[in-house]
Amino acid sequence: MGLWQADAQLGALASDFSDVWSGLPSNIRVKRSLADSAYFGNDCLAVARQHGATPLHGIKQNARHFIKPKTLYQKMTSFWQHGPSRAAVLYGKRNHAEGCLSMIQRLFGYRLRCRTEIGRKNEVQAKISMFNLFLMARND
């Protein structure tokens, strides 16, 4: 893959990431951005900071250590390298959410059958409500 292709793909990821943030309701205040290492670019991290979130994305295995981090990615890498257990606890919340979504998809299917956006939102809310009822019934 050429350098220009990688830059184009990162630009597309950054715009997709930006679209996610712009789609949030105005009454939602996000504390952290827990994305995987595909969203490691400074553009994605800057979008998270613009919306008031602390980016705590996964880092690449070959991430370099900087003595005086300047960019958001360097600061995040420094946090992961200096406090790996603290970073793992915070990033574990993402794993918990992924696990819940996986359970919902396993129980109700991964497809959304409604065509309109309002219908899709209602369908997702219904699946989450049914999943909550399923968990409550299982605990009794």
Image: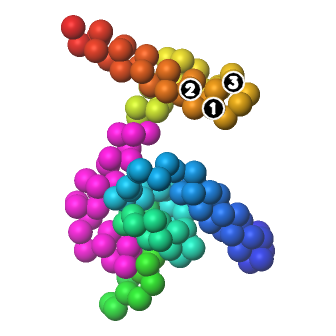
Q: Secondary structure at mark 3?
A: loop
Q: CA distance from mark 2 to mark 1?
A: 6 Å
Please indicate, yes or no, whether residue 72 appears anywhere in the rendered image.
yes
- Which residue appears at 57% of the width and 57% of the height? 22
Q: Secondary structure at mark 1?
A: helix
Q: Name the residue nearer the viewer: 133 or 23.
A: 23
The label on residue 118 is 1
Which image quarter holds the C terminus?
top left
Q: Name the residue nearer the viewer: 71 or 77.
A: 71
> What segment is highlighted magenta in the picture?
75-98
Q: What amino acid type is highlighted by mark number 3?
A: Cys
Q: What amino acid type is highlighted by mark number 1?
A: Ile
> Does 119 sit above or below residue 15?
above
Q: Are marks 1 and 3 in contact (CB under 8 Å)?
A: no
- Which residue appears at 42% of the width and 59% of the height? 33
Q: Secondary structure at mark 2?
A: helix
Residue farthest toward the front in the current orientation of the protein: 27
Q: What amino acid type is highlighted by mark number 2?
A: Asn
Q: Would you say residue 88 sits in the magenta stretch?
A: yes
Q: Position of residue 69 (x, y in %)?
A: 37, 87
| Lateral position of residue 62 relative to residue 93, left or right | right
- Which residue appears at 23% of the width and 13% of the height? 139
Q: Are marks 2 and 1 in contact (CB under 8 Å)?
A: yes
Please indicate, yes or no, whether residue 59 appears anywhere in the rendered image.
no
Q: Name the residue nearer the viewer: 94 or 134.
A: 134
First-in-chain label (2 vs 3): 3
Q: Which residue is mark 2?
A: 122
Figure quadrant of residue 39: bottom right
Q: Which residue is mark 3?
A: 114
Q: Would you say residue 52 sits in the magenta stretch?
A: no
